[in-house]
Amino acid sequence: MDASMDALLAALADPARRRLVSLLAERPRPVGVLAQLADARQPQTTKHLQTLERAGVVTSRRTGQRRVYALRPGPLRDLAAALGRLADTAEQAGGAQATYDRYGLSLRTERLAAREPGWADGRSFTFHRSLTGRPELVWRHLTEAALLTRWWRPEDLRVSALVFEARPGGAIVQEYRDAEDTDSTGPVVGRAEGAVVEARPGERLSYRLSPLLPDGRPAFTAHVEMALRPTGPGTDLDVHWRMADSTVESADFVAGIEIGFGQSLDKLAATLAADPHDTDSTSPDSTDSTSPDSTDSTSPDSTGTDSTDTRSAK
């Protein structure tokens, strides 16, 4: 919004001035009548009308001994249109506001359900994506840290540190910051640690991963299995996600699993579709960790956490 809109909003912020605008919407009126109808003193009413006139929403003229004020509908229509555009942006299908609202509903449900340890054990989610690119390329995006950082995150977060050792027993560390915290001055908003269980290149990947609570304890353990299957020029990816060891405090994490992991997989699909023949990355043998905030590789022991966000739970 421009300066004129700001001035109009400031003028309309006062209930007494909004009352005067309502009275003038009915018909032009002199100051004395407006003061009587608004049950206010005339000097105060005059000051309010002068503020509204400076904001451009009313105009006045002197007629004999009276000054008569009238409403200018144009600025109000412009303001309504600007506010309507903001509302349309927030409510666009599949937009960030819709995701926020969906997460809020899930959050309330999970918090009510989290009564005792183990409350969410056995909870499972399944995901399917038909991806562009052969299984060998998809595998690289699933296991090479430099490629994982492109997609393994929800919409409003960015990867600030990542370790993924694609071998049985290999370490996994995820760390996230807010997507708009580009200089890393804000807190770490999510951290998870785990290990690879099975790694069959181009075919099958399984691992366990635990998002951490603010005190460093695991919120729960996710057992994730991924199966890759060639389909002509592309790959079908099926993911089975199962929960164990859930704590009472894990409700906020659980509420974001389906949304957050689904967003990550959508990013993976978009990344592969943009360049299905991408070969610009380091080999698995030369790079298994990355820290976008630093030129140094990040190990599980070198990064701490300040706070935790459910959207980092994968």
Image: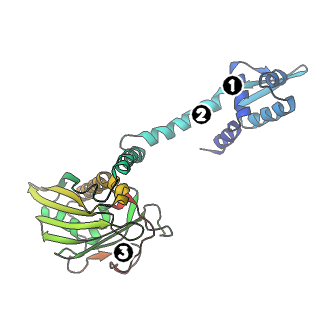
- Residue, disc 2: 78
The residue closer to the viewer here, 31 or 79, is 31
Quadrant of residue 81 within the rendered picture: top right
Work out how far the residue at label 2 is from the one at label 1, CA to CA, in angstroms.
Answer: 17 Å
Q: Find residue 22 and name its label.
A: 1
The quadrant of the rendering that contains the N terminus is top right
Count residues near mark 1 (Cα–Cα under 10 Å), then give few for <14, some for 14-19, many for 20+. few
Q: Is residue 85 left or right of residue 105?
A: right
- Residue 159, horizontal then vertical, whole percent: 36, 66
Q: Residue at x 46, y 61 (%)?
A: 180
Mark 1 and mark 3: span between their CA atoms?
A: 58 Å
Residue 164 visible in this rendered orientation of the protein: no
Q: Name the residue rendered at 20%, 62% in the picture.
A: 224
| 226 vs 36: above or below | below
In the picture of the structure, the residue carrying the numbered disc 3 is: 291
Picture quarter with the C terminus? bottom left
Residue 156, how many percent across, how many down?
40, 56
The amino acid type of the residue labelled 3 equals Ser
Q: Is residue 75 left or right of residue 196?
A: right
State which tag comes first along the sequence, 1 or 3. 1
- Lower position in the chain sequence, tag 2 or tag 1: 1
